[in-house]
Image (spheres, grey):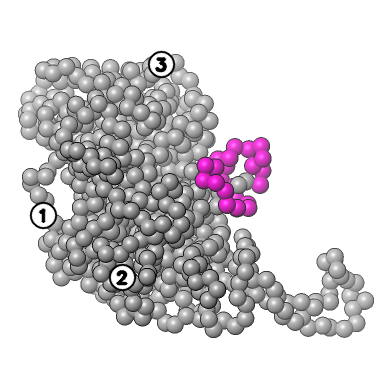
Amino acid sequence: MVLQPAERHCGDWSHRRLGPWCSPTGSPAPLSCETGCGEGTWILVCRLLVPTQVSLLSMEEDIDTRKINNSFLRDHSYATEADIISTVEFNHTGELLATGDKGGRVVIFQREQESKNQVHRRGEYNVYSTFQSHEPEFDYLKSLEIEEKINKIRWLPQQNAAYFLLSTNDKTVKLWKVSERDKRPEGYNLKDEEGRLRDPATITTLRVPVLRPMDLMVEATPRRVFANAHTYHINSISVNSDYETYMSADDLRINLWNFEITNQSFNIVDIKPANMEELTEVITAAEFHPHHCNTFVYSSSKGTIRLCDMRAPALCDRHTKFFEEPEDPSNRSFFSEIISSISDVKFSHSGRYIMTRDYLTVKVWDLNMENRPIETYQVHDYLRSKLCSLYENDCIFDKFECVWNGSDSVIMTGSYNNFFRMFDRNTKRDVTLEASRENSKPRAILKPRKVCVGGKRRKDEISVDSLDFSKKILHTAWHPSENIIAVAATNNLYIFQDKVN
Amino acid sequence: MFARGLKRKCSEEEAPADPLQRQSLLDMSLVKLQLCHMLAEPNLCRSVLIANTVRQIQEEMTQDGSWCLPGPQTAGRLPRDRLVSTEILCRSARAGPPQAPDPADLASALQAVPAIQVPGAVPAGPWGRAGPGESRGGFPRSLDQVFETLESHSPGAVEELFSDVDGPYYDLDAVLTGMVGGAKSGPEGLETFASAAARPPGTGCKADLGELDHVVEILVET
C-alpha cells in the first residue's frame, strides 16, 4: 500500500538520520512545563480521523465489509467498527505516531516539520503511511476465526533511514519496514513505451538506467512474520534493549524471539497448569526493562507483578521478585479479584519504577519494594459502588492502559465518558480532561472536567449516572520528550499539546 | 444507565451482601460463562475471572450452608466439582422449536453489543459452523470441563463444545445477545433481566433452581 504525501522535503538523508537513541532521562529537550500537569494547560492540536475503510466492491455491498483498498478521510458518522483504534504508540523520537485498529490496519502519522512561515503548524501530525498489517484468518484445526485486530504496536529504535515496527494480532507478530523512496531508475531500453519487451534483434545499445528524482513515496513492507507460537491470545509485545530480541506474551506463556529468526522462539514463561481445571490466573501484560536486557516483568489477573531475570534458569517460571499489595479487608467483595486484575504494566523511562493499572487505580511500584506500591492514584473511585452493574454490563472487564511522560513525573490513563486523567507525581495534583468532538475546537484550551459523586451537582460537573460507558479511553500515548499526548476515542485520534507561551 | 431493578439488588454497597443479591450474582455469572463458551474463541482472562467469582460465591454459600443440590438434601460441605450444579443449566435446555437463527441478524445483533466480548464475530460464526449436529447432552458438566474445552488441545475439541449445544440453544444465544443488546440501549432490558432473576425472599434452594429455570424460560421465549 503506497501513499503519496502532499509535500515533502527531498534531498539528502541527513535531516532524517537520527542520533542514537538515548534515555529520555537525559533528554535534550526540556519539557515545556516542568511543573507537570497541574499548572499546565492543554490544547487540542488536531483531531485525526482514522480513514474509513472502503471496499473495492463496496458500492452495493454492506459498509461493514472488512476488505480495504483505498482509504480516504470521511466524516466519523460513516465509521465502521473496523475503524476502532486498538493501539497507539509514538516512536522513540516522537516524530512518528502509529495507530492500529480493529480492522487490522496500521496508520502512521508524522509530525509536521517546523517551518518559519507556519510556526503554528508545528505539532500537527499528518498521515504518513497506511497499510493493512493483518488479515482475518481461519484456524482450520480449531475451526475458529482469528481476529485481525491489532493488539499492540511497538517501534524499534531507528538505526538507518527506514523505520521498523512490530505489530501483532491475537496470534501473529509481524515486523514492518516503512521506508521512503524519492528516486527511481529511468532509461531502460529493453521495453517499448507500452511496456512490451522489444525484440532483442532491434536492441543495439545497452543503456544503464539512471536514478532520477521522483515524488516521495512511503512504502511499508513486511520483513518478518512470527507465527504459530501462541496457543492463546497475544496481549503484549516488548522490544528488548539489546535491539536483537523481543518478547510476545499471551494469556499463559511468554516467548522470546530473535528478529532474524521466524521459525522458532524460546518459551521463557509458562504458567499453564498441567490440568486446565486448575487454572485460576492468567498473564495480562509483559514488558522488558528499558536498560537491562535480561530483566522483564509480567502482570497477572490476580493483581500481582513478577520480575524475572533471564540469566537465571531458561524458563523463568520462578520469579526474581514478586510484587503484591496485601488486600484491604474492609474493601473486600466478590469483585475484589476482578478489579485487582492488572490491565497494563509499564516501566518508567528511568527503569526504577513500574506502573500498573487495575480497574479503579493506577499504582507506582519501586522495584526495590515488593510488598506494596509507593503511590496509588484513584482514577474513578466513584465507580466502586457501581461494580455490580459494571459487572453485569461487562465494563468491569475493560482493559485500560497507562503511560508515563518523558521525565516520569506525570502519569496518564483513560476512563469513561471520553475522560482521561493525568496525575502529577511531584505536586500530587491531578486533572480530568475530555476528548470529545463537541467540546474541542482546534487550539482551544481544554477545560478540566469533574464528576459529581453525590450531593449537589455544580454547574459544570457531570453526575456519575450520566456518564457514557460506551465512550471509553483505553489507549493513550505520550511523546517521549515533549508534552504532546495522543488519545484514542473509538475511531478518533486526538492530539493534545501543552500550551507553550 | 443502571437499571433500577439492579440498583435494588446491588445498591450502594460494593457487592451484594445478602443471600438474594448473592444468588442473583451467581446466576448472572453462570449465564456469562455459558455465553462465553458459545463465542468463537472465549476470552480466557474474562472466563477465568468470572469462574473465580463463581467459585468464591459458592464457597461462601457452602459455608453458610445455603448451597444445596436438588434431590436428596445434603447439608454441609460438598465435593468441589459438584459445586457448579450444571443440572440447573442442563435443565434450561428446553425443547423449543429448533430454528437456526438468521446469521445476518445474529451478526448485526452481535455488532450492536460491544460489551460482550465478541472477537470479530462473522456472520458465518460459530452458529453457522456448528450446524444442528448431534447433541451430546446439555451444557458442560462442570466448571472444570468448561476449562478443558477452553484448552482445545485436540482438534475436535471446539467442535465437541459446539456439538454439545442443542438446537434450542441457538435461540438462547440469539436471545441472550439480543437481550443484552437491548439492555445496552436502555434500562428496560436490564430490568427485565433483573426482575426475572429476582426471587421472593425466604424461598429455599429448590425454589431458587426453579426460579433459574423460569429465568431461562423467559429468555428463550423473549
User: How far across and how far down the image is residue A113, in percent?
Assistant: 52, 72
Q: Residue A326 carries which label?
A: 1
Region of the chain picked out in magenta, as a range: A56-78
Residue type at the position of mark 2: Cys
Where on the picture, by quarter, is residue A230? Answer: bottom left
Query: B149 left or right of A145?
Result: left
Where disc 1 sits, the SS reads loop
Q: Residue at x 83, y 66 (%)?
A: A195
The residue lying at 49 percent from left, 25 percent from top is B101
Look at the magenta stretch and give its main secondary structure. Answer: loop
For the point 60% across and 53% down, the residue is A71
Disc assigned to residue B183: none
Dot 2 alpha-carbon crowd within 10 angstroms: few under 14, some 14 to 19, many 20 or more: some
Is B60 placed above or below A112 here?
above
Picture coordinates of residue B221, whole percent (x, y): 38, 17
The residue sitting at 53% across, 75% down in the picture is A115
Q: Quadrant of the N terminus of chain A?
A: bottom right
Which quadrant holds the C terminus of chain A?
bottom left
Question: Disc 3 sits on a residue from what chain?
Answer: B
User: Residue A297 versus residue B112: which sits nearer the camera?
Assistant: B112
Which residue is farthest right?
Answer: A202
Q: Against A329, is B35 above or below?
A: above
Q: Mark 3 points at which residue?
A: B96
Within-10-Å neighbours for mark 3: few <14, some 14–19, many 20+:
some
